[in-house]
Amino acid sequence: RRSSSLSAKMLAGSMPEDFMCPITQEKMLDPVIAQDGHTYERKAIEAWFSTSSMSPMTNAQLPNGNKTLLPNFNLKSQISSWEQETAFVV
C-alpha cells in the first residue's frame, strides 16, 4: 500500500515526506540507512554522529555504538524518478 500512496504523491507533484532528511528537512541527495533503521542525508547524519552515538529519530543508543551507514539505493532511485516525473530541478 505504501507504493500506491507514494505513486499518488509522485503524480500530484508534491515531494513525498520520505524524500526529506529528518535532520535537515530537505530533499536527500545521498540517502543512507543508519543502524537505527532510518534513512538520512549522508552529510547530515555524519555531522550528527561526529558529536553523538544516539539515534536522532529515537534518541536511543545505536546498537553497539555502530555508526555504519549503508547507501539507500532504492530511495535514491525513487527520488530520481520523482524528479524526472515532475521535472524537478535541483
Image: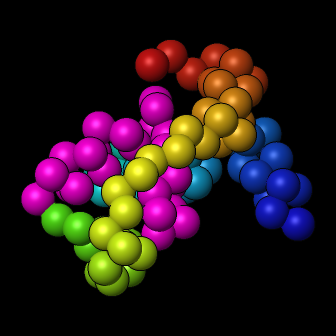
Measuring 55% from the left and 39% from the top, which residue is drawn there? 71
Front residue of this view, candidates 63 and 20:
63
Total numbered badges shown on the rendered structure: 0
Is residue 69 found inside the magenta-colored segment of the image?
A: no
Side of 46 where 86 appears, left or right = right
What x and y, as percent, mark residue 41? 39, 42
Front residue of this view, candidates 65 and 48:
65
Q: In which quarter of the image is residue 77?
A: top right
Seen as rendered, the residue at the extreme left is 51
Q: Quadrant of residue 23?
A: bottom left
Measuring 37% from the left and 40% from the top, which residue is drawn there? 42
Front residue of this view, candidates 51 and 29:
51
Side of 6 where 38 appears, left or right = left
Q: Quadrant of residue 17?
A: bottom right
Magenta-drawn segment: 28-51
Side of 4 where 84 appears, left or right = left
* Position of the C terminus by quadrant: top left
Q: Can residue 55 be seen in this view?
A: no
Measuring 41% from the left and 75% from the top, which residue is drawn there? 63
* Position of the N terminus by quadrant: bottom right
Seen as rendered, the residue at the extreme front is 64
Colouring mode (rainbow / by chain / secondary structure / one colour)? rainbow
What x and y, as percent, mark residue 26? 37, 43
Q: Is residue 30 visible?
A: yes
Measuring 26% from the left and 45% from the top, which residue is drawn there? 46
Is residue 34 found inside the magenta-colored segment of the image?
A: yes
What x and y, as percent, mark residue 45? 31, 50
